[in-house]
């Protein structure tokens, strides 16, 4: 039964990723934790796995819309690697509750960003795009 | 710098890191928002792949569940990128931010 719920949620998470340029992880992780019962570190690891195809497809489409600087993207990605490995190690070392609280903090930060985006007047947003 | 921070967030939190990279790119006037969003998504492919590798060492990956969420999500991202070009995201951003606050609260108090 849980599995049936997961599929539309996965779809929605993908939509969020496509619309806001994120990997979808902020939706995947809570879904994996609350619907499928994974612990926080497992949920994060599994979500990363799901993110790879999502990001591949997403960036391909963004590329078609002309929104990608390929060399820069590749560079930034490569530079991320040590951070990513360190982060994975840290995630598996921290206690569950600590990781969860940190993740909640991340969610609030993203919520804040989203709220700002929602309240930006059209004129302000054009300035952003200049 | 952006890369390291993005990578850290990706590996630590299981997200793509874009939420950190995009505002930094825009803030430091490297790219405008659309370009930042698209470009960071490319970076995310690399980051997420490596972060998966990092987590794999600890054995915390559930492949079946990853696929269960990942495949419909790919469908979603196609729909989402199409919508992004057509629809104003202000209302969606607002709703999404509320949703995130709710989830965060569940996280802390559960």
Image: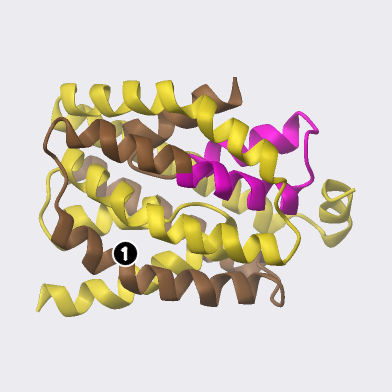
Chain colours: A yellow, B brown
Residue drawn at point x = 82 percent, y = 47 percent? A128
Does A101 sit left or right of B35 as displayed?
A: left
Q: Give A129 or B91, whichever is nearer the viewer.
A: A129
Q: Does the magenta stretch include residue A87?
A: no
Residue drawn at point x = 40 percent, y = 59 percent? A53
Residue drawn at point x = 60 percent, y = 52 percent? A115
- Where is residue A25 drawn, in percent x and y? 38, 51
Relative to A50, residue A110 above or below: above
Instruction: Please rate how many residues cluster around mark 1, counting C-alpha atoms within 10 Å: few if below 14, some from 14 to 19, many from 20.
Output: many
Does B9 sit left or right of B30 as displayed?
A: left
Relative to A87, residue A39 above or below: below
- Where is residue A117 drawn, in percent x and y? 67, 53
Q: Is mark 1 on a helix, strand or loop?
A: helix
Task: Identify the subunit bearing mark 1.
Answer: B
Residue B49: name its quadrant: top left
What span is colored magenta in the figure? B17-45
Residue drawn at point x = 24 percent, y = 28 percent? A91
- Where is residue B37 drawn, in percent x and y? 65, 50
- Where is residue A101 drawn, in percent x and y? 28, 33
Relative to A15, residue B54 above or below: above
Does B58 sit left or right of A99 as displayed?
A: left
Q: Is residue B31 magenta?
A: yes
Relative to A65, residue A50 above or below: above
Position of the N terminus of chain A, as image quadrant, is bottom left
The residue indicated by pointer 1 is B70
Residue B65: name its quadrant: bottom left
Q: Main secondary structure of the magenta part?
A: helix
Q: Give B78 or A10, whichever is nearer the viewer.
A: B78
């Amino acid at each position: 039964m849980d599995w049936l719920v997961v599929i539309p949620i996965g779809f929605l998470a993908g939509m969020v990723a496509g619309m806001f340029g994120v990997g979808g992880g902020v939706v995947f992780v809570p879904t994996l934790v609350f619907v499928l019962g994974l612990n926080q570190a497992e949920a994060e690891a599994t979500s990363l796995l799901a993110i790879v195809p999502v990001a591949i497809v997403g960036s391909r489409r963004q590329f078609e819309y002309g929104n990608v600087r390929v060399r820069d993207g590749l560079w930034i990605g490569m530079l991320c690697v040590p951070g990513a490995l360190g982060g994975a190690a840290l995630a598996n070392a921290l206690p569950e509750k600590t990781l969860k609280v940190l993740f909640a903090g991340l969610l609030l930060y993203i919520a804040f960003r989203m709220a700002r985006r929602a309240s930006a007047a059209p004129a302000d947003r054009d300035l952003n795009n200049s | 710098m952006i890369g390291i921070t993005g990578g850290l967030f990706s590996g630590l939190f299981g997200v793509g890191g874009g939420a950190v990279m995009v505002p930094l790119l825009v803030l430091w006037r490297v790219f405008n928002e659309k370009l930042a969003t698209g470009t960071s998504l490319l970076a995310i492919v690399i980051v997420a792949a490596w972060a998966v590798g990092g987590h794999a060492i600890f054995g915390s990956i559930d492949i079946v569940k990853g696929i269960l969420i990942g495949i419909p999500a790919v469908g979603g991202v196609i729909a989402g990128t199409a919508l992004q070009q057509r629809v104003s995201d202000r209302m969606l951003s607002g709703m999404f931010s509320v949703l995130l606050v709710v989830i965060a609260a569940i996280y802390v108090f559960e």
